[in-house]
Structures are given as C-alpha cells and as structure tokens.
Amino acid sequence: MELFAIRYVCCQGVPGASCRPWRREWPIYLDVGAIVKALVINCILKRSPEPSNTEALASVVAQRLSDKGVEVSSVRAVDLDIAPGVVTDAGDGDEWPRVHERLLESEILIVASPTWLGRPSLVAQRVMERMDAMMSETDDEERPVAYNRVAGVVVTGNEDGAHHVISEISGALADIGYTIPGQAWTYWHLGPGPGPDYLEEQRGRDWAHQTGRAMADNLCGVARALSALPLPPPG
C-alpha cells in the first residue's frame, strides 16, 4: 500500500518566486509496505536464559512492529564480551563489531534498560559509549551513519526514575544522529519505593502496553517516512 505526502519548499529569496514563502512540490509516495528492520538491544544485567522484566515489556513493542511488517531481532548485550571504549572495534575478542553491523542493517533501534539507582544500567552506559564511535562514521554521501534511522527506549523497574532513564538514553541517541519520534518510549514502574517486578505484577501493564504499541507505530511511521524522503548530509 502507498500513501503520499506533499512537500513544501521554501521560496524566499528565489528570483521570480511568488510572494508566498512556500511552494508545493509533486507528491512524494511513501511505500508503507517497505521492509524495515528493527534491532532491540536489551541492557539488563542478567545473562541468558534468566527471565527479564525489561525483555518482556520490549517484546510488546517488538510484536507490534512485527505486526506492521517490520523484521525484528534482538540482542542481550550482557551475553557478549563488549570491551570498554568509544571505538567501533576494540580488538582482542571484542564482540561489539557484531552489534555495530546489526545497527547499520536496521532502520529502527530500541534500547531497553532497567532502572538502577534512578539511572540506566551500566550495560546501557557501555552500549552508549561504544555507539559514540558512530558520530565520526559517515555513509557514501557523507551523512552520519545514524542519520535516517529512528530510535526509542523501553524502561522497567520497581522504583521511580523512568523519565530520567528515557531522557538520558534518548539524548545520547539524538547526539549520535538518530531521529527520536514523539512518544518513542514506554515504561513500567510502580515507584516510589521498592516493590514487585513487572513479571510479578499486573498493575500498570495495560498502560505500559498501550504506550508501547503507540511507540512502535511512531517508530515505524517515521522510519518509513525517512526512507522515502531521507535527510541530506549536514551543512
């Protein structure tokens, strides 16, 4: 199925242009059936196959993306030997290059993190630090490699702090070059104070799931729009 959008281009300062500051161009067709890939990086502290509250909530978003025709894959970062640093390949058994390759294959990125002491997990911090290297990588048109890709955040925890975690991770992803659509997050928290985990508690799930489905819709829609009308190189 195809939809179309009208692009308006600024005409101010163009000789012979009408007095109106914007002119309409031909419709741009968006192929809403185009294949899009998504990668979920789960940044919990527990290795596989331990159950993961964060993974369970992220799976709601992943399922919605799959229902919309997106190819979704995931990785539990703690299962890999990811060296510290801000480079793409740290050598000596570093497994980050495998994740980096999957990032470049995906138009959608979801970073999922639990909340610890009101902050993202140390694994999420390690992932962000390694993604820092992408800021100096460009494609064949000299665009940062994260341009024309979208990202969102999933957070769980039995204390408060979700919005802080979302803002930290979203801000880092925007710095790297990802586009962050409106409402590109969901979370489940029962705070303030300690309490049961997501897998143990039904309260709050309906809201977290509804928000997660909206998150998936927004990520998918903006990813397909950027595919049809990509951002140019900066400058």
Image (tube, rainbow, N blue to C red):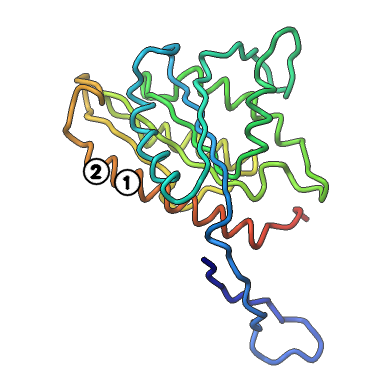
Q: Residue 109: percent from the left, percent from the top?
A: 54, 38
SS label for mark 2: helix
**Residue of label 2:** 207
**Kind of residue sitting beneath label 2:** Trp
Q: Residue 223: percent from the left, percent from the top?
A: 56, 52
SS label for mark 1: helix
**Kind of residue sitting beneath label 1:** Thr
Above/below status of 29 relative to 175: below
Q: Residue 8: percent from the left, percent from the top?
A: 63, 77
> In this orientation, which residue lies closer to the viewer: 19 or 170?
170
Which numbered disc covers residue 211?
Answer: 1
> In this orientation, which residue lies closer to the viewer: 8 or 222?
222
Q: How many other residues sit within 10 Å of disc 2, few (<14), some (14-19) or many (≥20)?
A: few
Quarter holding residue 227: bottom right
Q: Are marks 1 and 2 in contact (CB under 8 Å)?
A: yes
The C terminus - image quarter: bottom right
Q: Residue 55: percent from the left, percent from the top?
A: 39, 26
| Left or right relative to 88: residue 201 | left
What's the residue at 41%, 42% (across, down)? 185
